[in-house]
Amino acid sequence: MGNNINRREFISLTGGFAGMAALASMGISGWGDNEAEVTVDEIESKQHSCDVLVIGGGMAGLFAAIKAHDAGAKVLFVSKGRLGSSGQTPFAKGIFEYDPKNAKLTIDEFVEKVSLSAIGTNNRVYTRQLAEHSKARVDELREWGFFESPLYNKSFSKPINERQIPLMERITITNLIKENGKIAGAAGFSIDEKEVHFFNAKSVILCTGAGGFKPNGFPICDLTHDGTIMAYNIGAKVTGKEWNDGHPAKEKNAAASFDGWGDMFLQKPSTTDINIRHDLGVDMNYQAYVGGGGSMRMGPQGPNGGASVKGGPQRPAGLDNQMPGGQGSKPEGGKRPPKGKEGGAPPGMSGGVVGGSSAGMSIHKSEGLVPINDKCESNIPGLYAAGDALGSHMTGGIYTQIGSSLAGSAVQGAVAGEAAAEYSGKTEIQKLSKSKINTIQSEIFAPLKRESGYSPAWVTQTLQGIMIPNFVLYVKKESMMRAALAYVVELRESHLPYLRAKDLHELRLVHETRNMIITAEMKLKASLMRKESRCSHYRMDYPEIDHENWDAWINIFKGDNGEMLFEKQAFDSWS
């Protein structure tokens, strides 16, 4: 190293927040000259027009594009990755199917039991919608060959190709565009070609998934809350940031996602029956924190093969934790997915495991844009969201039903597609102003023009060191969250304006880093605001449930002066 410190001194310096400050003081700050390999003058600008723009190539995006097209809309389908092959969709292998002929609970009973597990945090309308429409979506997937292969691109491509829906892949969308108070389209750039794209649309459906802080060990590394933050920047309300997903990684080779979860990728998908549960994940982090341990033994009944956690996160009576695997599944070919060695847990959740591998992501379907009705519509006219991009609180602040996430994405994608098509048929397209196009294009490519600045990779690593420790994100207390928030605000104020990019790949990293930092601020401030413990949000300084003050969701929105504002929305109400 060029700063005359040895390995032991370096490790000592990087042991915590103070280490980061010390490194910065020694010049190890990610700052450097920008040797740009792409100039802005080389980049060609292209414009497109459609009725419905669908952003995101996973399960939600698939059904949004298909149903909008089938409802008569001119659809354009844009994906950051490859259709069916990026985000969390290719990992998800269980899809919930509510079949009224064989169901052991009525839909009313199903909704009530989910609400019991969610401790009231779920939106019952979206819980019911999941059950009512899941079978129809599963039947369509079966027709397209979804259950015949562990890879989804072929089955996803079948209905898209049959309908000749135009698809653009490997396009990083960076901006949503609003004109005259309504959605007017989006803008982004190609990863592979020197092109910037402007999409003029009557309506936009965000199917961009959730995201994290690019943690190791779980397949969410290409999801960074892009859609949520783009929508927030134009005035959309966002919710669910205080909840925490608890997926772990294997203790051995913890950073290797395929080592821990590869068997899931290699499985063919299957359907799941009703199996209401209360999967915390955060209880493992709590036990490791209070016990001073780093890894845990996971079995069918929770940490340490069923040992109860003293204190810590509460669980509703009658909903003891059951690790997924084997129970309630209906494989299409009659062969059940392989069980883990510890008695039924799937790959990645058996044996010795460590937490934090999905750090930065909330519970499926609990975070994202705030819906104003049961049509997946946001408070921005013409802007819709589906799947993990919609804060529908379908199962609330906890994961209650194996396979509900994939099914919920399919169901909500279809609902949003039909609603957006109907909206587009009744509205005029809002033309993109030339001044706004020029402004957005300058913003997108500013990091390429910067002569020097911070590396987005270094800023991301700094953010990970601040946010991923379990005593910040999972086992919460005000002092640590405020300390972390001070660092995050510092990154936003003093590092974001100086991010640099030498090529189009690094330009994508810049925009992803920007989105993760804003997300981190949201998560910390929402967690500080919710002064109670419930579901996947646990505070050591407020360990009890507070029904009197906190039977409400937290919504976040941008004020007129750019400040981050917060409001409560009572459970069972619309924004």
Image (spheres, grey):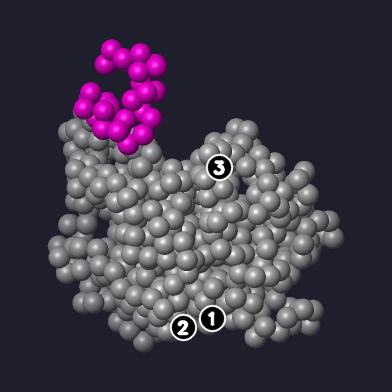
Residue 157 seen anywhere in this rendered image of the structure: no
Q: How many angstroms separate mark 1 from mark 2 (CA)?
A: 7 Å
Pair 1/3: label in front: 3
* Residue 156 drawn at (x, y percent): 60, 61
Pick the front one: 183 or 402: 402
At horizontal 27% and vertical 53% (from top left) the residue drawn is: 45
Residue 50, numbered label: none
* Residue 375 drawn at (x, y percent): 46, 81
Look at mark 3 in the image and give the residue it sits on.
291
The kind of residue on which mark 3 rests is Gly
* Residue 435 drawn at (x, y percent): 14, 62
Given the current orientation, which residue lies at the most extreme right position?
334
CB under 8 Å between discs 1 and 3: no
The kind of residue on which mark 2 rests is Asp
Is residue 56 rendered to the left or right of residue 283? Answer: left
Q: Secondary structure at mark 2?
A: loop
At horizontal 37% and vertical 60% (from top left) the residue drawn is: 527
The kind of residue on which mark 1 rests is Arg
At horizontal 66% and vertical 39% (from top left) the residue drawn is: 352
Crowding at dot 1, Cα within 10 Å, few <14 / some 14-19 / many 20+, comes out as many
At horizontal 27% and vertical 44% (from top left) the residue drawn is: 487
